[in-house]
């Protein structure tokens, strides 16, 4: 029930020790809040870096019943660290229900965008994230099961590893790296990948780079961010930046040398990272949203989340409807495209703290969408022959 629910919006630094202790206790007791993104440590570090950062403190009377770390972009509200925050929701005790619609209403959000909401809510639609959960026997037992199930795929990866070693030299993998120069290299490679794909470069705004550096620079007792890197001979062939807490390891930003794609260095690095991290006690390896084909060979668990945009009636909603109608008239409509454009806009809106930046990003996204739609229309359909 939300009838007697009230909210106070404060900076993270304003929370006292008792409130932080509640936050820590609630994430420890609720398995749905196991992701590193729900930890107080993530919110405290991110609040120092993300523009418009704040914490919503929910109360019933004088009693605190929940927290929601978020950021504002004008009248829009997003999870703290968006568009890079993969899981979010209200941090609350088990049994407390504060729905996403309640959060949008109490924060007076003109638009409330959540791609990976965990918790109560009816708006939007469900999506699934995927995980590899290690058995108690560890990585070797997990790998034996995967190889028995998908023999051809994993034999191909074993051949790829041998090929990579034959071409460049012995493979060496290191985990737990926190070298700022290596992180800058990863960010540069990832930004180039976004540009090649026609996607918004989330690192161009600056603060997103600072967030990864800040998270990596402050390892804590049960929380941190770090990189794993794979070398073949003297050559760096893959890097991955991950967030981890408790026994949960979240793969976040992977990059690999494109010229070596035939040898699957990124996938090999993920496998070796799992092997090394599992030996240290990690048991859940989160691959984020399903979609990329390779993930199906690794995962043995799923988590349902909710993607939603709660919009107050007004000009923002009208403009969104007009944009969708214009794309339909251009022959580029359809629910799939509209969902893609919503996600693109949410990314741009989250990255760009100024109106000018959001306008520039939206213009580029619109041109890209129209160009792709025109290219599809010009491509002749293939004719099947018997």
Image: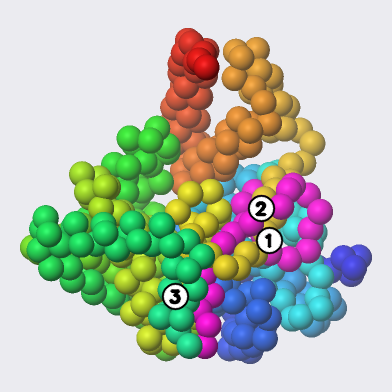
Q: Which mark is residue 304?
A: 1
Q: Per the image, is 107 magenta?
A: no
**Element at label 2:** strand
Q: Is residue 115 left or right of residue 240?
A: right
Instruction: Name the spot of residue 334 as percent of width and height, x first.
Output: 67, 26
Question: Label 3 to label 1, Cα distance in Å?
Answer: 27 Å
Asked if the residues shown at circle 3 and circle 2 are in contact, with their CB atoms under 8 angstroms apart, the answer is no
Q: Which mark is residue 144?
A: 3
Q: Which residue is mark 2?
A: 127
Q: Is residue 259 left or right of residue 251?
A: left
Q: Is residue 52 left or right of residue 259?
A: right
Is 258 located above or below residue 88 in the figure? above
- State the extent of the magenta-drawn residues as a range: 112-136
Is 235 located above or below residue 123 in the figure? below
Earlier residue among tags 1 and 2: 2
Which residue lies at the image location 64% right of the left edge and 22% below the top edge? 333
């Amino acid at each position: 029930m939300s009838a007697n629910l009230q909210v106070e919006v404060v900076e993270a630094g304003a929370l006292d020790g008792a409130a932080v202790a509640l936050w820590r206790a609630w994430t420890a007791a609720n398995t749905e809040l196991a992701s590193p993104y729900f930890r107080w440590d993530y919110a405290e570090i991110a609040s120092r870096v993300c523009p418009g950062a704040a914490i919503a403190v929910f109360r019933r009377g004088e009693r605190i019943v929940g927290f929601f770390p978020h950021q504002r972009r004008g009248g829009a509200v997003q999870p703290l660290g968006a568009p890079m925050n993969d899981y979010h929701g209200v941090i609350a005790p088990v049994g407390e229900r504060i729905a996403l619609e309640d959060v949008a209403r109490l924060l007076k959000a003109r638009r409330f965008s959540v791609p990976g909401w965990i918790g109560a809510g009816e708006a939007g639609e469900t999506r699934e994230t995927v995980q590899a959960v290690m058995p108690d026997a560890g990585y070797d037992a997990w790998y034996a099961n995967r190889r028995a199930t998908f023999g051809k795929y994993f034999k191909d990866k074993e051949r790829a590893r041998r090929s990579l070693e034959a071409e460049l030299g012995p493979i060496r993998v290191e985990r737990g790296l926190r070298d700022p120069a290596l992180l800058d290299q990863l960010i540069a490679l990832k930004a180039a990948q976004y540009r090649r794909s026609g996607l918004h470069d989330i690192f161009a705004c600056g603060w997103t780079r600072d967030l990864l550096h800040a998270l990596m620079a402050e390892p804590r007792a049960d929380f941190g961010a770090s990189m794993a890197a794979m070398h073949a001979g003297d050559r760096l062939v893959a890097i991955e930046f991950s967030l981890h807490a408790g026994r949960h390891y979240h793969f976040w930003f992977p990059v690999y040398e494109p010229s070596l794609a035939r040898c699957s260095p990124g996938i090999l690095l993920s496998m070796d990272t799992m092997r090394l991290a599992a030996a240290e006690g990690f048991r859940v390896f989160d691959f984020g949203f399903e979609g990329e084909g390779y993930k199906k060979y690794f995962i043995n668990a799923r988590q349902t989340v909710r993607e939603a945009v709660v919009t107050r009636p007004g000009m923002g909603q009208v403009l969104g409807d007009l944009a969708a109608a214009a794309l339909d008239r251009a022959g580029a409509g359809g629910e799939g495209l509209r969902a893609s454009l919503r996600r693109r806009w949410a990314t741009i809106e989250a990255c760009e703290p100024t109106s000018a930046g959001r306008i520039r990003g939206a213009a580029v996204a619109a041109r890209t969408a129209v160009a792709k739609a025109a290219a599809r229309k010009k491509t002749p359909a293939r004719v099947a022959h018997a």
